[in-house]
Image: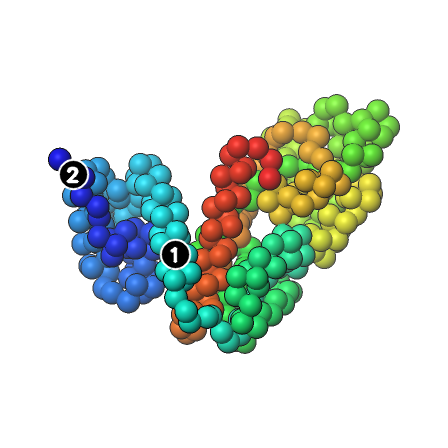
């Protein structure tokens, strides 16, 4: 007996719901009603033979198996989109303005953005940095890459990745003054950080170390400055393996300890609902999703 392949509209409904997190946001992106999204998810379940989403009262969430299936569907849809675009003779043109946090833009986006420009050479791309980590209000911006807890009212929000922090420093500092052999050794060096101490406080607590009553460290205005100081051996920073991937791969930074703590927020791709989708926005979103999918796969297999 041949297995039945789910219709593309049902797969798209699952993908939109998995990315955006709510039925109403998925309905808005797809241009259909909420009940239509629910109907398509139910149709999908009847075809695949397992529960994709669990329903409790008015709430709905993906099951663990549904999440795994949605991940595979996202990858398949990306391949179909890429095949379609490659077969289309009409290039993506116009302009696209992206706003990002300064640290993410300089430490990660600038290391990858040329591949997007190569793929879409007729698109005029502009990248600006925001003053606030959660900035998503500039009317002249098409898409925001913002850091926060996902709470941007009146915006379409897509989760990119959660941030797991761990200490990072230069190889020279790691071997200085007896080295970093146990977590308490970090207190012998300046702690590099932004305005808040929360990440260092949480990591020290997770390592069974009392937070010093008087802060011992240097405060910076953005993560790029924190990383620059860490690479120069000026102290120890809290970094994540995606944003700091370039410095880790180049051997400029090392992670002396494996204990990680979850940050209070993550990175999201944010778009005002007043700004309609266009080919440039769709192209960048697809490119970014495909890149994070590849990075996620590589991180599971080893350092990126």
Colour scheme of the picture: rainbow
* Secondary element type, mark 1: helix
* Residue at x-position 33% and y-position 37%: 64
Choose between 220 and 168: the one closer to the eye: 168
Label 1 Cα neighbours within 10 Å, binned few <14 / some 14-19 / many ≥20: few
Measuring from the top left, give residue 258's x and y in whole percent. 63, 29
Kindly identify which residue carries mark 1: 83
Measuring from the top left, give residue 21's x and y in whole percent. 36, 52
Label 2 Cα neighbours within 10 Å, binned few <14 / some 14-19 / many ≥20: few
Image quarter hosting the N terminus: top left
Which disc is residue 145 wearing?
none
Choose between 88 and 128: the one closer to the eye: 88
Q: Is residue 266 visible?
A: yes
Please determine whether, in this image, residue 143 is positioned above or below residue 196. below
Left/right placement of residue 132 relative to residue 122 reads right
Kindly identify which residue carries mark 2: 2
Q: Residue furthest left?
A: 1
Please determine whether, in this image, residue 297 is positioned above or below residue 141. above
Please determine whether, in this image, residue 268 is positioned above or below residue 90. above
* Residue at x-position 37% and y-position 60%: 84
* Residue at x-position 24% and y-position 60%: 34
Q: Residue furthest right?
A: 177
* Secondary element type, mark 2: loop
Q: Is residue 135 visible?
A: no
Q: Gap in Å between the C-alphas at discs 2 and 1?
A: 25 Å
Choose between 80 and 49: the one closer to the eye: 80
């Amino acid at each position: 007996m041949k297995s039945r392949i789910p219709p593309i509209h049902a797969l798209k409904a699952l993908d939109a719901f998995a990315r955006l997190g709510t039925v109403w946001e998925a309905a808005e992106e797809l241009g259909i009603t909420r009940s239509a999204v629910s109907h398509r998810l139910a149709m999908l379940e009847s075809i695949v033979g397992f529960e994709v989403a669990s329903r409790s009262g008015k709430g709905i969430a993906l099951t663990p198996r549904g999440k795994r299936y949605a991940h595979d569907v996202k990858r398949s849809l990306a391949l179909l989109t890429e095949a379609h675009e490659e077969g289309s003779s009409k290039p993506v043109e116009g302009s696209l303005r992206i706003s990002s946090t300064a640290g993410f833009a300089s430490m990660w986006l600038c290391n990858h953005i040329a591949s997007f420009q190569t793929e879409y050479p007729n698109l005029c791309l502009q990248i600006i940095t925001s003053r606030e980590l959660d900035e998503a209000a500039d009317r002249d911006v098409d898409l925001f890459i913002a850091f926060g807890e996902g709470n941007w009212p009146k915006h379409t929000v897509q989760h990119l990745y959660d941030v797991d922090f761990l200490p990072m420093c230069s190889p020279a500092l790691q071997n200085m003054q007896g080295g970093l052999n146990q977590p308490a050794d970090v207190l012998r060096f300046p702690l590099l950080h932004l305005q808040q101490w929360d990440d260092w406080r949480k990591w020290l607590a997770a390592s069974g170390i009392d937070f010093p009553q008087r802060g011992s460290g240097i405060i910076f205005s953005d993560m790029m400055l924190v990383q620059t100081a860490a690479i120069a051996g000026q102290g120890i920073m809290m970094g994540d393996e995606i944003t700091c991937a370039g410095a880790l791969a180049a051997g400029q930074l090392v992670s002396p300890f494996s204990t990680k703590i979850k940050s209070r927020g993550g990175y999201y791709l944010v778009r005002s609902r007043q700004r309609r989708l266009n080919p440039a926005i769709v192209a960048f979103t697809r490119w970014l999703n495909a890149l994070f999918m590849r990075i996620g796969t590589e991180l599971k297999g080893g350092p990126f």
